[in-house]
Image: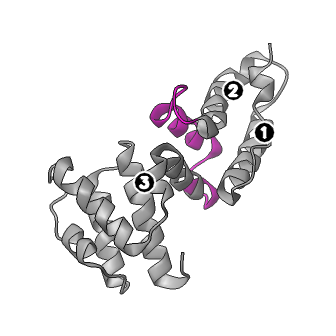
Amino acid sequence: MTDGVAGHATERLSDAVALWRVGAAPASEVVEAAVECLVADVDSPALRELAGESPGESRFILDPLIDQAIDELGVDRLVLANPHQAALTAVLKRYKRGELTARAAAQWAHRYIGHLGDDRCQVFVDFDDMYDTVNYQTSYTAADLDEWMADESGALLAGRASPGRTRIWRSP
């Protein structure tokens, strides 16, 4: 992504689309992000049309329009290829900015991705279970989980392999 206001607006659009695709954000966030892009001088025909749509418009109208806008802007292909990972990436960026706690990010992963979701996202789903049981075991503490969430988040956001922090949870 580019730097500055335009880059921030485009990233916000990508994040809003990712969250909307998994049902974690309303269409109004996508439309607002499209408007923000136009204000930041990011423009395309589909983006203009998307910015003018009603947030209450049918998903059958919004979906192809969103895909076209993303394609025209060259926005992160992860949004199209892997909605779970794209949405988790958006949530983890919020976590890293301090807008969510580690616990809240893990709860989000469990709710919107679940145990049957994308394999790369499972470590964050497991963290939610680990937070739930932290007071009933002696292998780790809440502080350990917070640190491990930071490690795993950093790895996913940087495109590195998972440090495997939840192996302790998966061990018999």
Q: What residue does disc 2 label? A: 130
Where are the magenta residues, as a range? 94-118
Looking at this rendering, what residue extends furthest in the right direction?
A: 139
- Judge whether residue 96 can be spotted in this image: yes
Q: Residue at x 29, y 50 (%)?
A: 26
Q: Residue at x 61, y 47 (%)?
A: 101
Residue 97 painted magenta: yes
Residue type indicated by callout 2: Met
* Residue 80: mark in rendering: 3
Residue 7 painted magenta: no
Where is residue 56? Give x, y as percent: 15, 52
Image quadrant containing the C terminus: top right
- Judge whether residue 99 can be spotted in this image: no
CA separation, marks 1 and 2? Answer: 12 Å
Element marked by disc 2 = helix
Q: Residue at x 80, y 37 (%)?
A: 144
Where is residue 46? Give x, y as percent: 24, 71
Element marked by disc 1 = helix
Query: Pointer 3 and pointer 1: residues touching (CB < 8 Å)?
Result: no
**Nearest-to-viewer mark from 1 and 2:** 2
Q: What residue does disc 1 label? A: 143
* Sequence-first tag of 3 and 1: 3
Q: Residue at x 74, y 16 (%)?
A: 136
Where is residue 37? Give x, y as percent: 35, 77
Near mark 2 (Cα within 10 A), the count class, few <14, some 14-19 or many ≥20, is many
CA separation, marks 3 and 2? Answer: 30 Å
Image quadrant containing the N terminus: bottom right
